[in-house]
Amino acid sequence: VRGVCDGYAADGYAVVAPALFDRVKPGVELGYEGEDLTHGRELRGELGWDKPLVDVQAAVEVLRPVGKVAVIGYCFGGSVAWLTATRLDVNAAVGYYGGQVADFVEEDPRCPVLLHFGETDAFIPIEAVDRIAERRPDIPLYRYPAGHGFNCESRSDYHPESARLARSRTLDFIREHIG
């Protein structure tokens, strides 16, 4: 996450990454495979959905004086980005492989949203992605020939070509909606 934040900061954006898991396990640092992945899912279950939105709202309030605010999330954060778009006041939201977006697809976004999914994602059934696309045809939803975590260099499913294309699309979207 820090590396992704550094990349957007290098592009000229003010960036904040709330430590969402600190509410249930302060200071936790997790990898993206094996036991860390399992532990992350357990923490996510303890956390629920309302607590992360409180932390996202706090981050939005920090950034609001700088200008328009967009949220970008990956995996669990991709679902949090969707919920942020539907429940909070932001100018744009981008979700990468948000596994629970389909569970909340009936909630109407209050801002423009962009979604990215891998076609071979072992954690998100393609039927869930299809359901999102069918229910929200007005939202740009891109599919990539890659698995879950295709944007993360630290994951076994990292797919450089898909990551580059998704980042390019994300930057274009962010520039369009927040400058």
Image (tube, grey):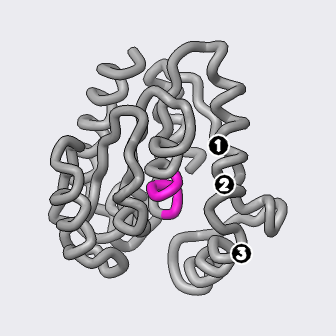
| Amino acid type shown at disc 3 | Glu
- Residue drawn 27% across and 60% down? 117
The disc placed on residue 56 is 1
> Where is residue 79 shown, x and y percent of the image?
47, 58
Query: If you read the primary sequence from the N terminus, does the residue marked by circle 3 or circle 1 appear first?
Result: 3
- Residue drawn 15% across and 64% down? 145
Determine whether label 2 and label 1 are within 8 Å by CB: yes
Q: Residues within 10 Å of mark 1 (few under 14, many from 20)?
A: many
| Amino acid type shown at disc 2 | Pro
Element type at mark 3: helix
> Where is residue 92 shown, x and y percent of the image?
41, 32
Element type at mark 2: helix
Residue 47 vertical placement versus 63 (above, below): below
In reply to whether residue 54 is colored magenta, the answer given is: no
The residue at which mark 3 appears reads as 46
Q: Quadrant of residue 30?
A: bottom right
Element type at mark 1: helix
In reply to whether residue 78 is colored magenta, the answer given is: yes
Q: Nearer the viewer, residue 36 or 112?
A: 112
The residue at which mark 2 appears reads as 52
Q: Nearer the viewer, residue 114 or 154?
A: 114
Residue 11 vertical placement versus 45 (above, below): above
